[in-house]
Image (tube, rainbow, N blue to C red):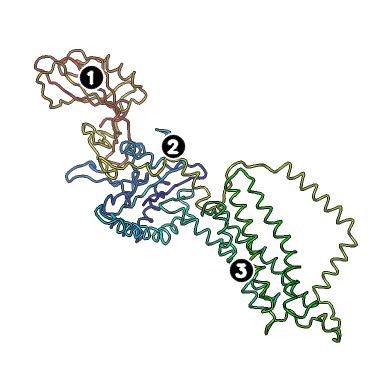
Amino acid sequence: FRLSVYYDAEAGDNLLTPRPLREIADFENELRSIPSWTAFCGEASQSAEFCRHGFSMANLAYATQRQMPMDIRPNILYFDANSTEVLPLDVTIRFAEKQNIRGAMLPNSYAPGSLATSRLRSIFIFTWRCCSVDEPAAEQNRKMTALSDRWKQFAQGELIPHLTNREVAGGRVYYDGSGFQVTEIMSLLFADIGLAGSSMIFVFLYLLLYTRSLLLSCLVIAIISVSVPFAFVPYSLLAGSPDLHLAQFLSLFLVVGLGADIVFVYVDTWKESADRYTDDGPRLIWTFKRGGKTSFASTATTAASFFANLASALKPLREFGLFMGLSIMSVWVLLSLILVPCMPLGEGPGCCCCRGRRRVSDAGAEPSPRVAPGFMARVVDVYILAVYRSRHLCLVASVLFVVVAVVWSGFWATIDGGVPKIWPAGHNLFRLDEVKGAFVSDSWAVPGSFFSSPFVGIVCGVESNLSSCDMHWCELADAQAAPPPEGECGCFVRELNVSCEGRRTAEMYHRIVGATHLQEEALLELLAERPVADIGLGWATAKLPGRVRALPMVMQEDWRTGSNMTHAMREVISNPQRGNGTICAAQEICFCGVPVC
């Protein structure tokens, strides 16, 4: 299971500086302090360091320096983000390049040597031993399901709440992980379903006041709720796929509003039927004919507008139109077949929808006295009278408003040909794909195996020939002394213990600290013209050097103040002719334009 954390400095600030890296280190230490995180890493059967530390630039920058007893210089760097002093960033990036993990932390746009980027990524990998190959497949699946459930519970309950809406180093934190997108999508979906449920509660209360029947109000809500899964049956057969897109869940809101409109049409029609018929049978027939025709007209035209999307060349739009149209028709069919036959049940005890009405069959009944209009009726009458008196002004104002709206739309409206963003602004998924796209895929950004630990660095002396060195270190001989003048170097030579048997030429290892202004050709030319006799080893002229390689950086430390500085170091190998009785190999270390160690 993987967790990827992305840091995006929205103002474009450089994250490869001590303060942002310190904030990132503190934030990631906070994540590691989550109890379940600690427990999961403790149970990791292999590669526990991949979740305990992870692949993070903050770990490299704030590495803990440790030294062997009786040694004055550090020997080992633990990349654990627990140090209070930041390492030189060029050292940390060179280490990441050596371990082939730079792509796990730096974006594709990072320019080597620039030491500047506004985006960083950290990757944590949780690896547990599930099962053995000799176990039955059913047992393997059971154990894998149990591990997946534990990870899902950990992500939903602790990880995602710690990561949501966090700002670190002056920018937003984005995150992704195994199963995270499904979890966040379902979270948003259930939140929207909750909003749809709230609208259903409002419709229920309004129906209860309007129909004065608890039975009919509950029945309407139940019918509206099942209309969407009812529509899924024909949709899955016609579309040939059981998949539903997020946008299709908008039908929940639509069927609530449209279903309420259909209910009001049937309820009013049923009330009017009491003025025409006495028996429930004729009333139901008249209600279905009159109310069904009226509600079907509005329902069919709304559904047809969605079915028109079937002519689109875009498959998601076709599927959206088909499902929405079927949902609309489903709610009409179910209300017509279930609600209308149940209308007489709404006139039981406690129902006042038909009381006090005069029926046509009651020939001898006295007409009910005229009731004075209520407050709302008087308000409506005043409004209608005002509109009638100002009908010419209202007509002109409406036409002018339409003209202004059309002109405004023509000048200001633009067409966005991209994929619309369906996530709310500020949500993790809103910009996650954009930020992730700046990096290589996290599935192969981390190598599958390592020849050396990516969490431990080796510190060597400036003269060391070990290939495993990640950084060279030396102490300044005199911190107050001025460096050699430009064009000059302070050099030291030492003999290397190499067998001379069968050797006609010697090997000279020239190490140059500094002199970064010299390109490779200029450096080779300088060493080729330099008299090898000046070295004092009794060698004759040297052959033209042909091999130049960059070595890990040299960090020089002032033991008095504790300050340090870093310099590039290159090595050139030459093969001078050796005389009889002379040594076979030597190393020369030159400090050019930089302080001498």
Q: Is residue 341 left or right of residue 489?
A: right
Asked whether the residues under the numbered discs 3 and 2 touch, taking CB atoms below 8 Å apart as contact, a structural biologist would say: no
- Pick the front one: 375 or 152: 152
Residue in the picture at 9% in, 17% down = 581
Q: Which mark is residue 108?
A: 2
Mark 3 vs mark 1, foreground winner is 3
Count residues near mark 3 (Cα–Cα under 10 Å), then give few for <14, some for 14-19, many for 20+.
Answer: many
Q: Inspect the image, locate mark 2, and give the three-letter code of the amino acid beneath it.
A: Asn
Residue in the picture at 35% in, 26% down = 516
- Pick the front one: 85 or 551: 551
Q: Inspect the image, locate mark 1, and give the three-letter code of the amino acid beneath it.
A: Ser
Disc 2 or 1, which lies upstream in sequence? 2
Count residues near mark 1 (Cα–Cα under 10 Å), then give few for <14, some for 14-19, many for 20+.
Answer: many
Q: Which mark is residue 574?
A: 1
Query: In the rendering, at what x and y percent does residue 140 appear?
Result: 30, 56
Mark 3–mark 1 Cα distance, whole angstroms, equals 89 Å
Count residues near mark 2 (Cα–Cα under 10 Å), then give few for <14, some for 14-19, many for 20+.
Answer: few
Circle 3 sits on which residue?
Answer: 223
Can you say whether 506 is above or below 245 in the image?
above
Mark 2–mark 1 Cα distance, whole angstroms, equals 37 Å
Q: Is residue 352 left or right of residue 65?
A: right
Query: In the rendering, at what x and y percent does residue 270 appear?
Result: 74, 74
Q: Is residue 478 left or right of residue 223?
A: left
Mark 3–mark 2 Cα distance, whole angstroms, equals 54 Å
Q: Which mark is residue 21?
A: none
Disc 3 or 1, which lies upstream in sequence? 3
SS for dot 1: strand
Mark 3 vs mark 2, foreground winner is 3
Residue in the picture at 49% in, 50% down = 172
Disc 3 or 2, which lies upstream in sequence? 2
